[in-house]
Amino acid sequence: MGLPRFGRPKGFEGDSSPNLYVANCGPAVGLSYDSIASVFSAFGELKGVFAADDSGARVIVSYRDESSATAALEAFDGHPCPDLGGRSLHIRYSVIQPTSQDFVSIKEEEELLAAVDARPWKSLSKRRVQHYGYEFCYEVNEYPTGVGLSPHVDTHSAFEGFIFSLSLAGPCIMEFRQYAECAWLPNHTSSPSMKMQSPEDDKSFLRRAIYLPPRSMLLLSGEARYAWHHYIPHHKIDLVKDSVIRRGSRRVSFTFRKVRTGPCQCEFPQYCDSQR
Ligand SMILES: O=C(O)CCC(=O)C(=O)O
Ligand SMILES: [Fe+2]
């Protein structure tokens, strides 16, 4: 599982950024993300506080404006901070390190978000959506912090093969669940908001989680698309193994599906509404 790709700045000492890499700070040293956010927000509006790595003792504090990061760095770097248990923080500017894993660039992400925000959203109970197209049917979902999506399989008979989902703005965890054969079929629906009966602690299914960073493209194919449910837990903070992943204030996903024109002939008849 990856983590947000922030890192220490690679350039000159003077390089600044709205993101701070803060060492000696995090849940492993007794500082919750909320307490860190509340202390750092005194210097300006925050985009979020994220784990910098798996240690639990290094975080990225991400501001909207560079000037806020500068003020916080000058106030806290190397000084004991009474509001954070008297700890001395080691702070540097950080940069988001775009990697080849990014499917779209930061600029393209901004343009896509501006384009969808210029169009009308349809409000559902917890998230907002936009629907486009028919033959090539794709969908934009906006999830505020803590809002997820109930476990579902995109209906075999309605949509062909691959399903793509582009994540923008904030990260999330997507959990995959393999239920006992056909347990879900009586209730199946193409609606992603379908509610499953299985509670969180149900051990009757296999579960795997993956991290979806902003600007990444998820491709669901084969078994993952046809035989496993996908699910975005309704959490503000996700725990996967020992990593703490904090959701951003907003996640927007572009989901691409192709409408099927004949019955599904997948290799998973036990999970297939066309073949039962
Ligand atoms: O938000 C996402 O990435 C997935 C959305 C989804 O699974 C769906 O709309 O069917
Ligand atoms: Fe889906």
Image (spheres, rainbow, N blue to C red):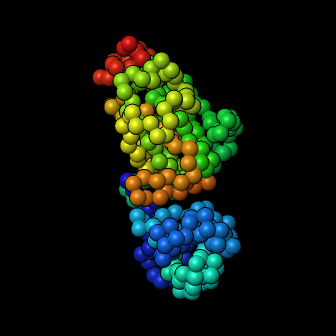
The front one of 187 and 75 is 187
* Residue 39 seen in the figure: yes
Say if 70 sits above or below 223 in the image: below
What x and y, as percent, mark residue 38? 65, 68
The front one of 266 and 195 is 195
What x and y, as percent, mark residue 218? 42, 42
**Would residue 219 be found to the left or right of residue 120 on screen?**
left
**Residue 274 lies in what quarter of the image?**
top left
The front one of 14 and 35 is 35
The front one of 6 and 182 is 182
What x and y, as percent, mark residue 30? 52, 71
Say if 255 sits above or below 155 in the image: below
Say if 265 sits above or below 33 in the image: above
Q: Image point 67% across, 74% down: which residue? A: 43
What x and y, as percent, mark residue 95? 49, 69
**Would residue 179 be found to the left or right of residue 34 on screen?**
left
Mark count = 0
Q: Residue furthest left?
A: 267
* Residue 94 seen in the figure: no
Q: Image point 47% across, 48% down: which residue? A: 173
